[in-house]
Image (tube, rainbow, N blue to C red):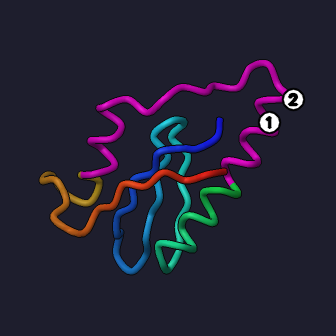
Amino acid sequence: MDFYTVVLRRSGVYWVALCLENGLVGQGSTKDVAIVKLREAIGSFEEECRMGENVYNEPLSIRELHEFLTIEGKEPVSEELELRAVHA
């Protein structure tokens, strides 16, 4: 895949990047660091998918996205969110 769709949100003092195509996450002290960590995870995951047969690889469900957006409380987060295309 040429690019992935990523949702970025703050979680405490960290940024978390969530890939919608496979559910992988990266975390860092800045948006850029979170994306770098996510790219590393995607690279490792893609390599494992090429080598293994029994690797679960499905897009994130709406329920899982909702959990990500509400993980720290019952209400959707009102903090900054960002949607990006990431080339990995």
Q: Residue at x 25, y 68 (%)?
A: 80
- Number of labels in the image equals 2
Q: Residue at x 66, y 51 (%)?
A: 88
Q: Are marks 2 and 1 in contact (CB under 8 Å)?
A: yes
Image mark for residue 48: 1
Give the image location of residue 22, x and y in percent: 54, 36
Q: Residue 53: within the magenta?
A: yes
Query: Furthest-left residue in view?
Result: 75
Q: For mark 1, give the secondary structure.
A: helix
Q: Amino acid at mark 1?
A: Glu
Give the image location of residue 44, x and y in percent: 76, 47
Residue 77 is left or right of residue 87, and the answer is left
Q: Residue at x 34, y 49 (%)?
A: 68
Give the image location of residue 72, x and y in percent: 26, 60
What's the magenta region? 41-69
Location of mark 2 (residue)? 51
